[in-house]
Amino acid sequence: MDAPLNDSVSGDGTREYAFTPISGGDHLLTVTGVVSDVEWEVFNDPGLGDLIRDCDVEYLPVDEGCYIAGLIAGQTYYLQIIDWGGGGTSYNVQVFAASPPSDGFQPNDSHPAREIFLNGGTYDLALDITSDKDWFEGCLGPAMSIIQVTTMSRGSGFGNIDTVVEIWDLVGVVMHKSNDDQPNSLWSQTSFTGGPGGWYSVRVRSFGAADYGDYRLVIAES
């Protein structure tokens, strides 16, 4: 599939393909020329198990392109294209070795550039490259509070990434850390009790700096 593949999918249908990259590392997979809303998914298993990446950037009839981290040269992967628009579409598929863009447009990559939030909330975010780290800072309420910090999928059409969540104090000490503590998943969840009016920092990164993609950060105070 280093050269474009031209094909089509029926309304609400699926099509499956296999591809074997000739080089290892990051790759870009694009589905272009569509006239219906499509999503693509890549699996390790020919039975479409062990999802490693999916891509549904827009819930509109637009081209879909996403990066896949760390493919292995000579290993076969399995691609499924899904039509969500109901009308069916022709398309061009291409997968080729390509590195993700630099992360310079992300303003919150370091503690000094952390993003401020107040009293929790829900945030739809992304780790844009494997080494990306997202920093946030929160203010506790007027009484002793329990803060729960959770990462999860952004919902239908979004994949899973292996996150690590860390809670830092403002002098740079990690107070709490969560890896795969969201029940039965790669996602993270931790909680802590904080004093009234205090500030704390949250850092989200991928496990082993080996993954990137979309995620939802939920910060709940009780």
Image (cartoon, rainbow, N blue to C red):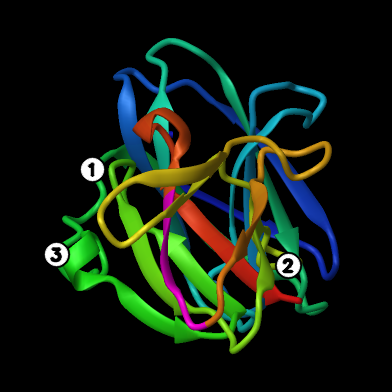
* Residue 3 visible in rendering: no
Residue 144 has which mark? none
**Which of labels 3 and 1 is toward the front?**
3
Q: Amino acid at mark 3?
A: Gly
Residue drawn at the location 14% of the way across and 64% of the way down = 104
Classify 122 as above or below 128: below
Q: Which residue is mark 3?
A: 104
Left or right: residue 58 compared with residue 9: left
The CA span between labels 2 and 3 is: 27 Å
* Residue 137 visible in rendering: yes
Query: 10 Å neighbourhood of mark 1: few (<14), some, or many (≥20)?
Result: some
Q: Which residues are magenta?
A: 197-204
Lower position in the chain sequence, tag 3 or tag 1:
1
Give the image location of residue 220, x and y in percent.
69, 74
Residue drawn at the location 29% of the way across and 19% of the way down = 23
Q: Amino acid at mark 1?
A: Ser
**Which of labels 2 and 1 is toward the front?**
2
Q: Which residue is mark 2?
A: 155
Q: Nearer the viewer, residue 57 or 23?
A: 57
Q: Which residue is mark 1?
A: 99
Secondary structure under the numbered disc 3 in the rendered image: loop
Lower position in the chain sequence, tag 2 or tag 1:
1
Give the image location of residue 54, x and y in percent.
61, 50
Res 149 quadrant in image: bottom right
Secondary structure under the numbered disc 1 in the rendered image: loop
Give the image location of residue 27, x and y in percent.
35, 38
Q: Amino acid at mark 2?
A: Gly
Lower position in the chain sequence, tag 2 or tag 3:
3
Classify 63 as above or below 117: above
Residue drawn at the location 37% of the way across and 57% of the way down = 169
Give the image location of residue 205, x and y in percent.
41, 47
